[in-house]
Amino acid sequence: MLHRLIFALLMSFFLAFLMTAWVTWLNLGGDRPFFQPWLTAFASAWPAAALIAFLVGPFVQKITVRIVNQLERTRATRTH
């Protein structure tokens, strides 16, 4: 459980950090103040992203395993 929590916090931090920077830059461009609106967006986005990552992470992991298993079975049947 601790691993899941730390992973969700770190992954959501980097995703929220980079995505809010990108979207803020797209919306404001380079001619307006950037850092204050970006940090405000990040401060709002990170808690939501962390909660979503923690709650949805196990579901996404299960879907990922199913997709990878299906791709590996498909690949194995094509090579034989």
Image (cartoon, grey):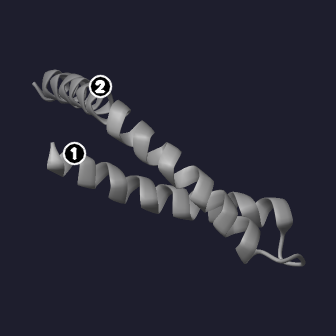
Residue at disc 1, secondary structure? helix
27 to the left or right of 49: right
The quadrant in which the N terminus is found is top left
* Place of residue 16 in the rendered image (x, y in percent of width and height, measured from the top left): 53, 56
Residue 34 lies in what quarter of the image?
A: bottom right
Residue 28: image quadrant is bottom right
The residue sitting at 82% across, 59% down in the picture is: 27
Q: Which residue is mark 1?
A: 4
Tell which of 76 and 55 is nearer to you: 55
Secondary element at tag 2:
helix
Residue 9 rendering spot, x and y as whole percentages = 35, 54
* Viewer-closest of 61 and 55: 55
What crowding class fits label 2: few (fewer than 14 Cα within 10 Å), some (14-19), or many (20 or more)?
A: few
If you read the primary sequence from the N terminus, does the residue marked by circle 2 or circle 1 appear first?
A: 1
Crowding near the residue tagged with mark 1, few <14, some 14–19, many ≥20 C-alpha atoms within 10 Å = few
Q: How many marks?
A: 2
Measured as percent of width and height from the top left, residue 74 is found at: 22, 23
Q: Is residue 14 above or below residue 36?
A: above
Disc 2 to disc 1, C-alpha distance? 17 Å
* Mark 2 or mark 1, whichever is nearer to me: 1
Q: Is residue 3 left or right of residue 24?
A: left
Report the residue marked by disc 2: 63
Mark drawn on residue 79? none
Q: Residue at x 18, y 26 (%)?
A: 69
Q: Amino acid at mark 1?
A: Arg
The residue under label 2 is which amino acid type? Ile
Please determine whether, in this image, residue 46 is positioned above or below residue 78.
below
